[in-house]
Image: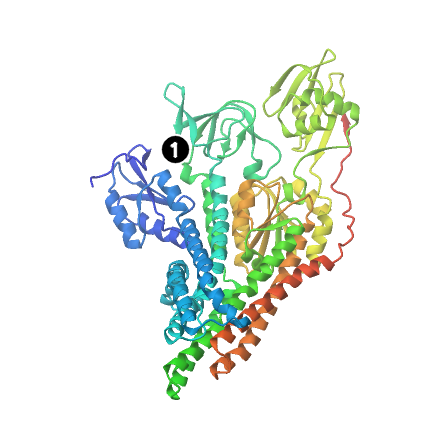
Amino acid sequence: MSALGVVAPGGRTPAPGRASLELLVPGARCAACMSKIERGVAALPGVAEARLNLSAHKLSVTFTGPAGDPTRLIDALDKLGYRAALYDPARAREAEDEEGRRLALALGVAGFGVGNAMMFTVPVWAGLFGQELEPATRTLMYWMAAIVATPCALYAGMTFFKSAWSSLRRGRANMDVPISIGVILTLIVSFSETLRGGRHAYFDAAVTLIFLLLIGRWLDHKLRSKAQGAARDLLALQSPIARRLDDAGAPRPTPIGEIVVGDRLAVAPGERVPLDGVVLSGVSTLDNALISGETAPAPAAPGTAVHGGAVNRDALLVVEVSARAEDSTLAAIARMMEAGAQAKSVYVRLADRAAAIYVPVVHSLALATFIGVWALGLGAHEALMRAAAVLIVTCPCALGLAVPAVQIAASGRLFQKGVLVKSGAALERLAEIDHVVLDKTGVLTEGRPRLVDAPPVVVARAALLARASRHPLARAVAAEAGLGLIADRCVETPGQGVEGVIDGRTARLGSAAFVGVATPGLETELWFDAGDGTKVRLVFADALRADARAAIDALKARGLTVEVLSGDGPEPVARACAAAGIESWSARLTPLAKSDTVKALQASGRKVLMVGDGLNDAAALALAHASMAPGAAVDAAQNAADLVFEGSGLMAVVAAVDVARAARRRSLENFGFSALYNLVAAPAAVFGLINPFVAAIAMSGSSLAVTLNALRMGLAARSAKTPAPVNAGPAATRPDLELARP
């Protein structure tokens, strides 16, 4: 292939004299893949930069010159172990859910095998109730079951077989190893019994086990896809089209991928800023609530640095781009979210820890049984049957159910309390936390400014101006007054306030400087000048959630430390934390600063629970050991969180911690029972006291026992009494209304 200038599709020119190429790398799935690919490609001669987007599986490569060789790039990726092709959005969407389609197909095949194999095995089971079939008929039924079940089990079980083989190649054994060996050995024993005309074969059991396990795998895949959607939701805030100004100053709609550093963009009122940049002209205010969590609008004037995703509120701005789409603040947060989600995905679950001990012990015992029985002269068939009995009676079904059964019961209990659990592993992580990090706005507080102690007559007159503004504090005044009229000849000065005519007088509502008061203005106040010489200060507060103090006290009583990380200013953060009883807090934090703080806490050995609701919390939510978001949170925060709670109270966080700890205790009880069961059942199988049929019944009984123990959580929930509400005390500091005369 010839050298690359401007490549299409998938290529673009990011800056004069440089070429760029976008490749689809569907095999990249984790943070390790991202690091390996970016380092490997960036080390190639002629490559200036390489950035991989895990959510879209898109690798963006910038070359040092006006041309590059895509063949060399694709060959390098192939040597790293990844196939690549020119990026095409339609092809990327198709590759994204390939795993889900494969699991769904395997699940359908396994279900078909279960239903049809049982058509032939159910008549054999009837022999247990005096309806014994003739030996020839029984053998025929087993052969028919084998014809149906064997190919279904082998095809549907490839998910487990490949995983088991991959694990063994790395010198480790996961839960798929005993599952795979158990399924294959069950089929071998079943064929052996059928060829000999034996009474018991287990073709239906093999495919049924795979069918049940695939249900869990498919649900786990859907949950992971939902988690990856958090980063996609965040990047969706970058509009695909920006209005780039040409040399004549005329706006031209341009795809965001073609915008380069130095381009000038026009941002109209009500639009999101497409990319990071610096304001060249225009005066307005920006709503950074979704980016920084700051509730007060930020002024924007020439020279002000702005972030992509912020909403321009008042007037037209011209912004000079300072970072490409791949290097923007939103892209950086999305990359941290992807890395955090992948770090959680490799969390070692309780069942996998148990499997590390269980797998080598049980399979060594089965192998020793086979060799020992054969060496004693009892024959290969007896040796195989005893080894099969050992594997069947110690089948990891009970071990595999020990945690999922508890997690299902715990998730149901939390659902009744208004908490949605998105991942079973999240409950395990939540049970381990020792430090709680809260966002302020929307989590510790209600997330909306409210007018404090203002006389109704003042509110009614100020609302005549407030209804003409989109400023959040002005909206709070209008909401307090209700529907009504608007003053005559209203004019809003961006970042200052609103002026209009009330009863023939010129009135103003806005900042202290705007109404002529010589006092330092605060971000949580407005001043109203009715035109008669009296200027009234209107103070706003973001009230604490009603149960915030009670929830903080309950978390501390459980041995947890609590901290607030907020993008708001120091004064409102300090007031809210003092009212809630929180000593440790930080203010004016950027999204990256929040995530860096969480990483530092975890590097020091803390297990952090992050509770947040905004885009500025999304990266920290993904990086934390466990995370929660309220139901009113933005989509990206909810997708990044492990649990989502409804309602207006923080006691749901306390309830989630309690249930997670109880679930861990139940899981450990189930592991203890499984260990005791295996200590009794395995020797019985070794000495031939139970055959494979009895072993299968015993194994099913152990699975039932751990399931019943898990259901005790639901019984405990119904019998528990609801605690009486605790008085949370004053919701927030309520400064008095002030009067000032010039």
Position in image of residue 349 (x %, y %): 52, 62
Expressed as whole percent of the image width and height from the top left, the position of residue 740 reads: 76, 25
Q: Quadrant of the N terminus?
A: top left
Q: Is residue 600 left or right of residue 75?
A: right
Q: Nearer the viewer, residue 570 or 95?
A: 95
- Name the residue that disc number 1 marks: 261
Near-viewer residue (248 or 146): 146
Left or right of 410, for residue 241: left
Q: Which residue type carries mark 1?
A: Val
Identify which residue is drawn at 58% across, 72% down.
672
Colour basis: rainbow
Q: Residue at x 65, y 58 (%)?
A: 659
Q: Is residue 403 above or below residue 91?
A: below
Task: Pick out the residue farthest to the left.
Answer: 2
Could you tell me which residue is drawn at 40 percent across and 32 percent down? 256
Residue 388 vertical position relative to residue 550 in the rendered view, above or below: below
Nearest to the observer: residue 248 or residue 168: 168
Percent coordinates x, y for residue 538 in the rendering: 73, 29
* Residue 673 point in image, percent of width and height: 59, 72
Left or right relative to 605: residue 54: left
Can see residue 611?
Answer: yes
Direction bottom: furthest residue: 376
Residue at the image point whose x is 49% and y is 65% from the top: 122
Specify the quadrant of the image occupied by residue 572: top right
Residue that extends furthest to the top in the rendered view of this protein: 504
Q: Nearer the viewer, residue 579 or 529?
A: 579
| Label 1: which secondary element | loop
Q: In which image quadrant can residue 292 be found?
A: top right
